Structure formats: C-alpha cells, structure tokens
Image (cartoon, grey):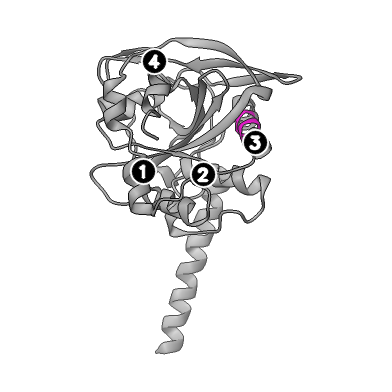
C-alpha cells in the first residue's frame, strides 16, 4: 500500500513538474505592446554621459484622488558627484500584515530626490492578484519619478502608512545602487520581463541590486517575501542609519503627517524629512 502511494505521489510530482516546464516553454511571453493603464504607458530610461545621468520619462503625476490624476513625463539631469543619500521606503498595505510595497529614493546635494520603484505594469482594467503574479500575468517596470508623485500617492490618497528610512551605506555604494537600478530600467525597455510575486517583486529586486554590489549582504528571509517586515530585516542588518531601538525608529520614520502638511509644495521632499 505504501509503495503504491509513493508511486502515485511521484507521478503527481512529475506531472506538476512537466506542467511547469511546458508553461515555461509555451506559456505567455512578456510584451512592450499592450493597452497600458494610465501612468504606466511609458517606461523610464537613462542616458549616461560621464558623471551626468539624464533620466527620460520621469513620472511626475499630480493626484486629485487615486484614480483622478494628471501625468507629466519629464526629462531631468542628475550629477552623480552630487549624490548624497539613499532612502528605503516601506508602504505596508493596511488590510493585511505582511504584504507591502517598497522602493528606493536617492538624494542629491541641493535638495533634489529621485525615486525608483519596481512595480508591475498594469494593463487597462487590470487589478493585482498575488496568485496571478505567479502566473506571468503582469509585466515588470521600474517607475522613476518625483517623490511628490510616488510618496504622495501613497500617503495622501491611498492613506497607507509610509516609512522613510535613511540608508546606512558608503556614498560609492549608493551611487552603484542607483546606476544599477537605472541600467535595469534600460534593460526592461529593450527586453520585457514578467513580474513574479515571489521571485521578481518590488522587494526581491531591491535585494538583488544590493546583493549584486555586496554578495550575500541580504540573506534569504521570509521578511523579503513579506515586505512589511523588510524594514525590520534592514534594521537587523545595520542598513538603516539610526541608533534608536527598532520600535522607536519605526515611529520616528513614519512620514504621513508631514506628507499631508507639505502636500503639493515644492519643498515636499525637504518637509517630509523635517523630523528625521
């Protein structure tokens, strides 16, 4: 009886493996040509010329609500010699404990900030499903934008709690991280890829960039797969620039009140860091 059950189990495993391989070989293919949702129509890319980086299709949307907004696509030039800081942004989703969105922002001398967010690229009418995110249903994109877009959308319109953590890293590592993310954005503009809930999400891609620069810096952890815990992992690894206990740091680096106070202002990025 046990031998028979083992055979049945082995057959089921082999069938599942065969189905997975067939899906990989003959399943959907990523595309650059779909009817994209407003705000996802354009992919960001960057030109590198010496120490100057020119970002194209930088998104700078102005929101009246989550679904009512105007999108401006801009070109901006950044001097890598003026790069000074990196910030890790965590947006836990209010309905669950575990899922969250994470992204990076990079600060330059003079008060300029450039946010880079790894996201799924939605088609018109699509909504996100973690299960469909495992089944090649969404393309991957790197949204490069103004903090007044990427942060304000989440704090002031989605009304999610948002945490803005200063990253502890040498300046040259911060520069390498930014360049790595922008080059990845360039690659996706040429060769599209699928988003994957487990292997190619917002947080796993950030971890990949970190480990590309310093192999093994961020170990495999459930706190990566459940990114609402990713700030706790970053804190434990010494990647957050603070001497506060984690609970106090989390409270200190919550920026919702400041984001509401500085909504729409030119000094928004300075304002949200006022108490940090």
Residue extending farthest to the bottom is: 1
- Mark closer to the observer (1, 2): 1
Residue range (magenta)? 177-182
| Residue found 54% across the figure and 27% down from its top | 107
Report the Cα–Cα distance between label 3 and label 4.
Answer: 29 Å
Pointer 1 with pointer 2, Cβ within 8 A: no
Residue contact at pointers 2 and 4, CB within 8 angstroms = no
> Marks 1 and 3: in contact by CB < 8 Å?
no
Q: Quadrant of the N terminus?
A: bottom left
Given residues 154 and 242, the one toward you in this image is: 242
CA–CA distance in space, label 4 to label 1 = 22 Å
- Do tag 4 and tag 1 residues touch (Cβ < 8 Å)? no
Task: In the rendered view, tell whether residue 272 sits above or below residue 93.
Answer: above
Which mark is on residue 61? Answer: 4
Q: Position of residue 157 (x, y in %)?
A: 26, 25
Q: Distance between the residues labelled 2 and 4?
A: 25 Å
Please state which of the two labelled residues, at mark 3 or mark 1, is closer to the viewer: 3
| Tag nearer the camera, 2 or 4 | 4
Give the number of the disc on residue 100: 1
- Give residue 171's mark: 3
Mark 4 crowd level (few <14, some 14–19, many ≥20, 10 Å Cα) = many
Q: Position of residue 224 (x, y in %)?
A: 46, 52
- Badge 2 is on which residue? 200
Whether residue 139 is in magenta: the answer is no
First in sequence, mark 1 or 2: give its number. Answer: 1
Tell me the crowding category of disc 3: few under 14, some 14 to 19, or many 20 or more residues within 10 angstroms, Cα based: some
N-terminal label among 4 and 1:
4
């Amino acid at each position: 009886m046990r031998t028979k059950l083992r055979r049945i189990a082995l057959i089921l495993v082999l069938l599942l493996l065969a189905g997975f391989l067939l899906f990989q070989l003959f399943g959907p293919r990523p595309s650059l040509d779909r009817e994209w949702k407003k705000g996802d129509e354009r992919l960001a890319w960057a030109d590198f010329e010496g120490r100057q980086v020119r970002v194209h299709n930088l998104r700078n949307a102005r929101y009246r609500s989550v679904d009512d907004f105007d999108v401006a696509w801009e070109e901006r030039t950044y001097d890598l010699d003026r790069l000074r800081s990196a910030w890790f942004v965590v947006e836990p989703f209010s309905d669950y404990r575990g899922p969250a969105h994470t992204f990076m922002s990079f600060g330059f001398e003079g008060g300029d900030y450039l946010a880079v967010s790894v996201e799924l690229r939605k088609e018109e009418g699509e909504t996100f499903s973690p299960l469909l995110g495992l089944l090649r249903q969404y393309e991957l994109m790197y949204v490069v934008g103004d903090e007044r877009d990427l942060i304000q959308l989440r704090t002031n319109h989605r009304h999610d709690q948002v945490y803005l953590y200063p990253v502890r890293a040498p300046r040259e590592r911060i520069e390498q991280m930014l360049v790595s993310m922008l080059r990845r954005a360039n690659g996706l503009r040429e060769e599209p890829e699928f988003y994957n809930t487990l292997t190619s999400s917002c947080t796993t891609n950030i971890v990949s960039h970190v480990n590309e620069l310093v192999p093994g810096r961020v170990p495999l952890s459930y706190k990566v797969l459940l990114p609402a815990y990713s700030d706790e992992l970053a804190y434990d690894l010494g990647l957050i620039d603070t001497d506060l206990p984690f609970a106090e740091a989390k409270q200190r680096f919550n920026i919702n009140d400041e984001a509401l106070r500085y909504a729409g202002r030119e000094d928004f990025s300075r304002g949200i860091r006022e108490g940090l």
